[in-house]
Amino acid sequence: MRDDVLGRANVRDTPELKAYYAELARYDAGALWTVANDIEPWEPRSLSVPTLWRYRDLRELVMRSVDLVTPEQAGRRVVMLTNPNRKDVSACVGWLYSGLQVMRPGEEATAHRHSASALRFIMEGSGAYTVVDGHKMPLGARDFVLTPNGTWHQHGVEADGGWCIWQDGLDIPLVNALEANFYEVHPQLYQPVTKPIDDSVKTYGGPGVLPVNPVWTKPYSPLFKYQWDATYEALQRYASVSEGSPYDGTLLQFVNPVTGKDVMPTIGAAMQRLRPGERTLAHRHTGSVMYQVAKGRGYSIIAGRRFDWEERDIFCVPSWALHEHANASDSDDACLFSFNDFPVMHSLGLYREEAWTENGGHQITT
Amino acid sequence: MRDDVLGRANVRDTPELKAYYAELARYDAGALWTVANDIEPWEPRSLSVPTLWRYRDLRELVMRSVDLVTPEQAGRRVVMLTNPNRKDVSACVGWLYSGLQVMRPGEEATAHRHSASALRFIMEGSGAYTVVDGHKMPLGARDFVLTPNGTWHQHGVEADGGWCIWQDGLDIPLVNALEANFYEVHPQLYQPVTKPIDDSVKTYGGPGVLPVNPVWTKPYSPLFKYQWDATYEALQRYASVSEGSPYDGTLLQFVNPVTGKDVMPTIGAAMQRLRPGERTLAHRHTGSVMYQVAKGRGYSIIAGRRFDWEERDIFCVPSWALHEHANASDSDDACLFSFNDFPVMHSLGLYREEAWTENGGHQITT
Amino acid sequence: MRDDVLGRANVRDTPELKAYYAELARYDAGALWTVANDIEPWEPRSLSVPTLWRYRDLRELVMRSVDLVTPEQAGRRVVMLTNPNRKDVSACVGWLYSGLQVMRPGEEATAHRHSASALRFIMEGSGAYTVVDGHKMPLGARDFVLTPNGTWHQHGVEADGGWCIWQDGLDIPLVNALEANFYEVHPQLYQPVTKPIDDSVKTYGGPGVLPVNPVWTKPYSPLFKYQWDATYEALQRYASVSEGSPYDGTLLQFVNPVTGKDVMPTIGAAMQRLRPGERTLAHRHTGSVMYQVAKGRGYSIIAGRRFDWEERDIFCVPSWALHEHANASDSDDACLFSFNDFPVMHSLGLYREEAWTENGGHQITT
Amino acid sequence: MRDDVLGRANVRDTPELKAYYAELARYDAGALWTVANDIEPWEPRSLSVPTLWRYRDLRELVMRSVDLVTPEQAGRRVVMLTNPNRKDVSACVGWLYSGLQVMRPGEEATAHRHSASALRFIMEGSGAYTVVDGHKMPLGARDFVLTPNGTWHQHGVEADGGWCIWQDGLDIPLVNALEANFYEVHPQLYQPVTKPIDDSVKTYGGPGVLPVNPVWTKPYSPLFKYQWDATYEALQRYASVSEGSPYDGTLLQFVNPVTGKDVMPTIGAAMQRLRPGERTLAHRHTGSVMYQVAKGRGYSIIAGRRFDWEERDIFCVPSWALHEHANASDSDDACLFSFNDFPVMHSLGLYREEAWTENGGHQITT
């Protein structure tokens, strides 16, 4: 790892140095200059590669898991999405985890809690619900629900519902890497529902209003469910008065209404809308993002590669990878749901963003 | 001001002391013990008295101002509501100001800005609008709009609208008392509308979502308008899952969505709903409140006096006055809009609250 | 209050209007345009006048109070400093209160607490001490000590000390005006000392270090005492590396070390140093300030009037009054201790500051 | 990874499942239940092992690097401390990096900056200095200095100084893992000193006082240097009024005086003092810690292993490892400097702490 730049390490191995390195190793030590250029790169190098998971490939595989394992055996019947270079940490991109989970009517997974933060984005089916710390929430397609770090949570499908599939998003790889993960199964296996149905949305989901008491001080949003209808309406209204971002189209982030900040301390989420025919410019930023196509079809160019997507497809953008999006329809809008680790970047002072200025702001695909 | 309690001042005047006091006065000084018990009362003593302003009394008077003065002469045609003991500072209660303003179709007041914070609550009419820093917002009955400290603002009624009356609420007396009021007339008298109509609501009025850019750092809400329909629906939804407060029924405060805090640094606002037949318990708190009856009829008992109210009536609760509310209808709900100086109390560490525990939690009316 | 400027009220009284005003008054109402220009001034008008209290005038008067009243009768033997225009609210400037208190060796005032925030600045004597919520602190000349809102506090002088005089500073007028003052005498009249002597300074007074537990969440500083020696040394060190402010010389504000913010929610305090011969430029700001000369001699020009001062003299600068300071010595530095209501201005979004640019930045004295 | 607990995965491999897993892998997918118990452990499992680096082992090796490489070749002559299980990421514990750097009189390393945050703790020598964004600071033994993320920094030793050795601490492994590291060599290779010597300490190092302007808004402390003398005095004073922590003795954390929070967003630091003969109880917490013995001798029991230490020895405590400390002297105190990643744990909501209650609170050594 020599680098012929002043201020960088550039040491040639010699027999004397090799002997020295061996002696250092005996004392759990090493010479910084042998790795300095490697561990202090000029800019971030993500281990993850841009990847697209097609729903038409995965749906049948997910469904098949129902016949292969029971929820009791599997804990949860989930097909994980693993980035080619991150299988060792079960990550889909960076330190994020994602999977597709299926449940049949009448099934309910046991309750547990963990230090990892989690979210679900409903892809298909009816009758799905989640219970978070006693708050039960029915879920429809394209609804987004939180099960924050430390909360008891369990998922199920009502007996009169249909087969349900949703995407899970978690920071399990991050919390493991940070050596801070705790896990508990609920002492009664299933937690009781102690609040009126949907009380979270009915209490915290009004626009520009909040209850005064009790004061909410937990580090995550008390609004656990973000419904598609309201979100899509908000996007349309916002798009009617704003040009939006040149890189993201019309984007709204999901927030904790009590603070106006990200929904959880480690995971942020957003829904963005591309106008018919809209094609954004390329930019890049630190932080990893997982996208799911909530509506429409189009393509994204990520690190120079083009990925065509349609509804329910999932793809990732690794940290510092250039990316731009395009709606392939001239008549319909397209919407992308996404979750990310931006809150980690912001909290730790590591967020950085850069527009791509060459070639009219667009990447040249390879 | 003698007080026969150990630790309190209890000094009898003597000729010697009188001479001493006179000498002190020559040096812009005085003896603390002559006023100590007065300026350190056991608990707050409000100068304001509980007062009810009946709309049926005021409406005609407000209308008549149209014939008496032009907007050009008057600046604004406003009938101030003055607390009997606070006429000297033009306050309706504590350090809050309120007035009823009328405008005819086609009229528009000139734009100005000031250090005082302001709000309006629309009482009747159609075609009203407000422009705040270039953002124009149409206003319907029972809508609530902010014109925060330091923003250019102007009010008007469209040519095809009807006569409009609204309630103004400001902290003018407070800002004057704090000797911090600045006032400017807009250099072009009328400010231009520079943004799409209602862009504030369409940008910041979605539930649980916020735009990412630009970052809003001003000390007041970027959501300037809170519409009655959405607020009333939020109240009903909240009431369906919560018992509400024993003192306030179902109450939602209006918030800055970017922070989850009060809409402006000096004035808070809320809408509360009393169920059919609901009667709350008495409590008291520091901070002054102005109420307007947005819907229904009922009564409030304030410092032992009963005040019956109906739609569009206005009343005040002075600091530390006991108060309780009742909905007089067994079939319809009642709603109270209110604004207050609680943000001042909270920021300065002066908020205190106390439930009334005697007589089953209800005051005995005098 | 007519004003011949477009956008301002300019209504001439007529018999018809007078009748209208009388009718409004019957309903606790009035016409805004009769007072609008008065209550919306172009810029702040302070009721307070710049005032200097000479210690050579006051010292003997303060001492004499010892013979005239006992602490038991008076509660506290304090000569208040009253601004000529603010005697009605016992204020020295704006909504601040100040007084000079004297105690003899062996005397101890009873303990009390109140919503008002308080501080003391020791002027002369030895053996003085203050007890705040069980923390006892010995005090020397020019030490600054807090007795924050809601804390039990009592003052005394050790039996082997000397006569002590100090300046009290409080926000009593403000808290009364805000109708939020509560007062209690300690149930045992004198509170016990429950902590090691000076534990506050020894726990929170280290530079750049803080204890981890317990977590301090109260709205005021846990560091109650700021010692002159350390403060003066800090000023000298700061002056050795910084030009300081053109308006204030070398100024350090006293802070809550747990937040880096003002020591109390309503009162800030600072110590500033003028180099030998230093003369500052004029500026003005919202907020009121009381100064005490901690060291040296010089003069200040306040709203065009020159006030010459020497050690232990006290003077005030009203809100929005232009002011500039000068050290009259070419060999010795001068230090001004001050307390203010800037935290109120900042919390409520009302702070504004302006440099004086005419006449080379200096006022012309009248 | 089967686990015979309800709510955990417990699926036995079958030929059918193996085929299914193979098919999943073709689509960059996998079955969660094959790894679930592994990636959701009951409690944190650190990859790092408790390790002690003896200064008597390392000192000569560090010195020898002077003859082996020049600063120009090596960038910096640093002997890294590598945890046996973390050599792949050049970490000493968790995601922290540490190394011992040596410099001769007259040497100066080139200036660079990076997203990683850094600190130095001086071990021996005279004439050392660091320049951070134009602020030059002389450094003595046991002084602690910051070179925060994004600041230009360079180190050197004055020509009339002695050989200097210090410990570096950085979060390079973390910032690399988070794929957010940027690195730049200073365009002029050496940055100019633009501020008076030690202006940071002289501006921000006063106890309980802060300058008003300019307002410091960066996410790290403007106080870059924390001097041993002042820190040790603060510890002694604190110890004189407090029992201290049962797990840590008398511990003060280094803080950003402008916020009262950690010195940098990703790295915290503390100095703790063990009384003569003091032996603490065992506890554990998430987050990794590197210790250096600043004074005295004693031992620590970490995860059941005893490590004896003396001045300048360095040791680590991995996340969630039980640990307790003992001062081996009955007459002299012992001091431990430490740095950690607690700010990461706190920002991300992952901090957890637990006292050890068995065996009288002490571990049984193995």
Image (tube, coloured by chain):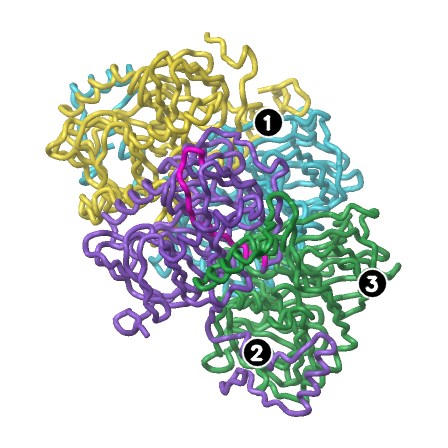
Chain colours: A yellow, B purple, C green, D cyan
Whether the magenta-drawn stretch holds residue A104 is answered as no
The image shows residue D115 at horizontal and vertical percentages of 56, 32
Kind of residue at badge 1: Tyr
What residue is shown at x 16% (from left), y 19% (from top)?
A: D15
Kind of residue at badge 3: Gly
The image shows residue B61 at horizontal and vertical percentages of 43, 54
Image position of B148 (left or right of C323): left
| Image height of C298 relative to C74, above or below | above
* Element type at mark 3: strand
Q: Nearer the viewer, mark 2 or mark 3?
A: 2
| Image height of A98 relative to A200, above or below | above
Near mark 1 (Cα within 10 A), the count class, few <14, some 14-19 or many ≥20, is some
Chain bearing tag 1 is D
Disc 2 marks which residue?
B36
Query: Toward the viewer: C182 or B118?
Result: B118
Kind of residue at badge 2: Ala
Q: Split into 4 quadrants, where in the image is the N terminus of chain D?
A: top left
